[in-house]
């Protein structure tokens, strides 16, 4: 599913809202989740799962074309842990 499909589904289920309002709502939710992760906070959506970040240490990588060593800096990457309800729906 892509963002426009999500907007269409939410708009269909809430006919009292305009498409522009739904787009703004979806964008606000995603912006808040992204902002919280950027600040190092955890975002938990009960029944769905939890978003957090994980630290990756610096390492030496390889350029796949030349095989030359490339320094890869330390970074944070997003991590998602599904909730119990989501796991049960997927496996049940």
Image: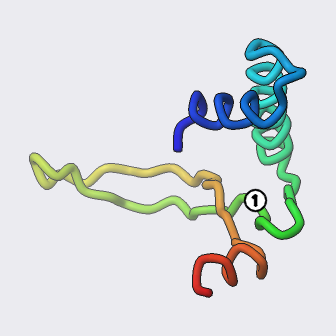
The furthest residue to the left:
66
Residue 36 percent across, percent down from the top left: 85, 44
45 and 39: which one is in front?
A: 45
Relative placement, left or right, of 17 versus 75 is right
Q: Is residue 38 above or below residue 20?
A: below
- Could you tell me which residue is drawn at 81 percent across and 14 percent down? 18
Residue 31 percent across, percent down from the top left: 78, 31
- Could you tell me which residue is drawn at 77 percent across and 67 percent down? 49
- Could you tell me which residue is drawn at 60 percent across and 33 percent down? 3
- Could you tell me which residue is drawn at 64 percent across and 37 percent down? 6
Q: Is residue 44 above or below residue 5?
A: below
| Rendering colour mode | rainbow
- How many other residues sit within 10 Å of disc 1, few (<14), some (14-19) or many (≥20)? some
Residue 50 percent across, percent down from the top left: 79, 65
Relative placement, left or right, of 46 versus 8 is right
Residue 8, picture quadrant: top right
The residue wearing badge 1 is 51
Relative placement, left or right, of 92 versus 84 is left
Give the position of the C terminus as an image quadrant: bottom right
Label count reads 1
Q: Is residue 35 above or below residue 85?
A: above
Residue 87 percent across, percent down from the top left: 67, 80
8 and 41: which one is in front?
A: 8
64 and 35: which one is in front?
A: 35
The furthest residue to the bottom:
92
**Secondary structure under badge 1?**
strand
6 and 26: which one is in front?
A: 6
């Amino acid at each position: 599913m892509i963002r426009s499909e999500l907007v269409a589904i939410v708009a269909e289920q809430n006919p009292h809202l305009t498409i522009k309002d739904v787009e703004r709502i979806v964008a606000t939710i995603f912006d808040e989740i992204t902002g919280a992760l950027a600040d190092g906070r955890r975002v938990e959506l009960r029944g769905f799962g939890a978003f957090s970040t994980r630290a990756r240490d610096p390492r030496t990588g390889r350029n796949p074309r030349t095989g030359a060593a490339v320094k890869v800096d330390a970074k944070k990457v997003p991590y998602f842990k599904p909730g119990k309800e989501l796991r049960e729906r997927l496996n049940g």
